Image: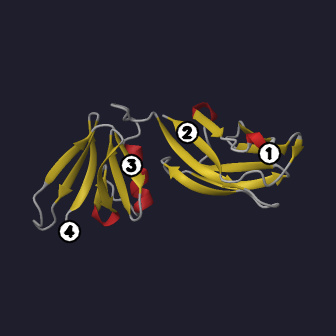
Amino acid sequence: MAKYSFDVSGNQLIVSLVPVLADVQPTSMSYLAPSFKIGVGKINAYEYGQPKQSFLFTEIGEIDGVAPTDLQDAFDKLTALTANFNGGGAAPYKVYTALLTQTGTNAPVATVLENTIPGFSITPKRSFTGLYQLICTPVLDINKVYFDVINTQIFSGFIISKEITVEGIVQISTKNGSTPTDGILSRTPIEIRVYN
């Protein structure tokens, strides 16, 4: 079965269909300002933010001369290969967006909406009443990060504050007035941007 190979030429991503045993004619296409998102069992490719093509993992051959081991590895390799592309509207950052919910004395739970940061994940922890940490892997470079929490409960008198420590740990605190309080995070949107 023919497979796609991915390489860079100048400021373009070149995607070539490489035949195996003459099963198809070799073809290639180029992408300016490419970006990628992981779908169910596939990687969706975009050009200037517009959908262009989807690739099943079984269709992916080599990315910059190296065969990926799985879908996440393919996504990580593609985003790393095109990380410095910023022509024609590509965002100068990668993003992690999630909804945080915290109940009782449990750690918050993150429902990930989007994650375009290669290999990035968070582990939420509850430190004390109303104080939570998001342990980031890999550790964030605080000089290249923007972080925000959208307080959807501001009219209820709840206060949600945030900071990124020098160690790159995201901290979120929740209060009812001036009293630290659990249970305030309820599908609370967070966004972490890592700039190139």
Residue at 20% in and 46% down: 29
Mark 1 vs mark 2: give the one in front.
1
Give the numbered dot on residue 174.
1
Q: Nearer the viewer, mark 3 or mark 1?
A: 1
Q: Is residue 106 above or below residue 86?
A: below
| Distance Cα–Cα, label 3 vs label 2 | 16 Å
Q: CA distance from mark 4 to mark 2?
A: 38 Å
Query: Which quadrant of the structure image shows residue 125?
Result: bottom right
| Position of the N terminus by quadrant | bottom left
Sequence-first disc among 3 and 4: 4
- Mark 4 surroundings within 10 Å by alpha-carbon count, few (fewer than 14), some (14 through 19), many (20 or more): few
* Callout 1 amino acid: Thr
Distance, label 4 to label 1, CA atoms, is 54 Å
Q: Position of residue 47 (x, y in %)?
A: 31, 42
Q: Earlier in the sequence, mark 4 or mark 1?
A: 4
Give percent across and percent down for residue 71. 41, 61
Give the amino acid type for the residue marked by disc 4 in the picture.
Answer: Met
Q: Is residue 43 above or below residue 173?
A: below
Amino acid on which disc 2 is placed: Arg
In 3D space, how far apart are the residues under numbered discs 3 and 4 (Cα atoms)?
Answer: 23 Å
Residue where numbered disc 4 is placed: 1
* Residue receiving disc 3: 36
Q: Are marks 3 and 1 in contact (CB under 8 Å)?
A: no
The residue under label 2 is 193
Residue 113, placed above or below residue 160: below
Of the numbered discs 3 and 2, the one sitting upstream in the chain is 3
The residue at the point 28 percent across, 63 percent down is 59
Residue nearest the viewer, comparing 12 with 183: 183
Image position of 123 (left or right of 1): right
